[in-house]
Amino acid sequence: MEVAKKEPIACRLMVIGAGMAGMAAALFAARRGISTVQAGLTGETLYASGLFDLYGVAHGNTRELIDNPWQGLKQLKQTYPQHPFCLVSTSQIRSAMDGVTDFLGHAGHPYAGYPDQNARLITSVGTIKRTFRVPETMWSGVQALEEKAPCLIVEIKGLRGFSASQIVSTLKPSWPDLRAAPIELPWQNRLGPKYAEHIARGLEVEAARRDLAEAIRPHLGQAKFVGLPAILGIHDSKGVHHDLNQMLGRPVFEIPTMPPAISGIRLKETFESHLPPLGVKSFYHHTVHSIHRLANGRFVLELGRTEPETTVVAEHVLLATGRFLGKGLVAERQGIREALMDLPVCQPENRSCWHRQQFLDPKGHAINLAGIEVDDRFRPLNPDGHVVYENLYAAGSILAHQDWIRTKSGTGLAVATAYGAIAAMVNDLVDS
């Protein structure tokens, strides 16, 4: 029996990629009423910490920590005009960050932070991290650290990748009133080795929250704050957090855990469930198998899981496929190539120039600055500096001349450049 061929899906914008840049671009486009199709693997979002870094370490040859990201970005724009942040104004960056956090807040995952300062919070290994926005479930940890208040860090016996005793031993010299307490969760014993996702989903049941509070209560003592690994639910972290605050009678906060993390699962599932109602036609577990451009300028894309299943005809395409982890860039013996459209990649002259001799060299590694060069409208350029296609855009970590991991600017770079690319596309539509 011959299977009927599906009709192609027509759209104004095709977003390729389902990381933070792709999700942000789809969100910004949908809010502007642009018909949008999105494809990509959301699994990489599982490795997100949930912390929204904007700009935490100075770009360049130093390791200067940034307290005020806006001042830091102003200096960056004066010193490194090729950096992608230079393509977006301060007001656009603010709108981008606010747009994503507002979306997540309305979806039940509110964020908190200072207007003009990076916050400081503790990590799962006891170090201190600067970041711009944190899930509201983690915000009391910022306050506890600021005050150095009496604080209890709770460790769930058998939970992998989190050690309260390590956190306390690392921080106790500067935070004397910090204590660790291991607890058991009887309702988890039948599951064998404990994983954060199992516990988080279990805590969406009220009885499990009561059990957790009862296990913690004997250890409270004089603690004014209680820190837990990030396990307070998936879909209703706000409700789980509120209940534990009430049950324990003091502020509770989550501590980000090692990836894959609950905070990443929350982001993944929130975007997957709340973008489609805004009008985004999503193919989140599909990849783009091929793309070509018609004589009329439109792009034809073949999407599918393991083989082409759906055809999309798009007036514009935004490439948000990431770097090496997202497989937007591929490192080969001959050099670095862009995986989908074979776009030119700005990169070191040869492989011997990719890395410095010391892994933790404060100057960073040249390979981390590789990527796609774009014009002031986020359109990829060819080696001669000319736009490849006037209706093709790129955003996120695939862009050249930035090192988002080293500068602690991952979310900021992703959402700001996505915002800028969508704004440029809208302007191009008006001009045409």
Image (cartoon, rainbow, N blue to C red):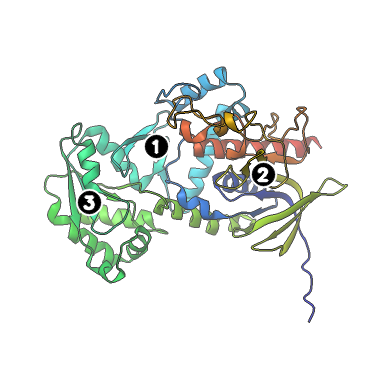
- Which SS class for mark 3? strand
- Which SS class for mark 2? strand
The residue wearing badge 3 is 154
Task: Say which residue appears at 45% left-offset and 40% top-offset.
Answer: 52
Q: CA distance from mark 2 to mark 3?
A: 42 Å
In this rendering, position of residue 231 left or right of residue 62: left
The kind of residue on which mark 3 rests is Val
Task: Say which residue appears at 24% left-offset and 44% top-offset.
Answer: 166
* Numbered badge on residue 319: 2
In this rendering, position of residue 110 left or right of residue 167: right
Q: CA distance from mark 2 to mark 1?
A: 30 Å
- For the N terminus, the quadrant is bottom right
The kind of residue on which mark 1 rests is Gly
The kind of residue on which mark 2 rests is Leu
Q: Is residue 259 above or below residue 193?
A: above
Q: Residues within 10 Å of mark 2 (few under 14, many from 20)?
A: many
Residue 34 on image: x %, y %: 69, 48
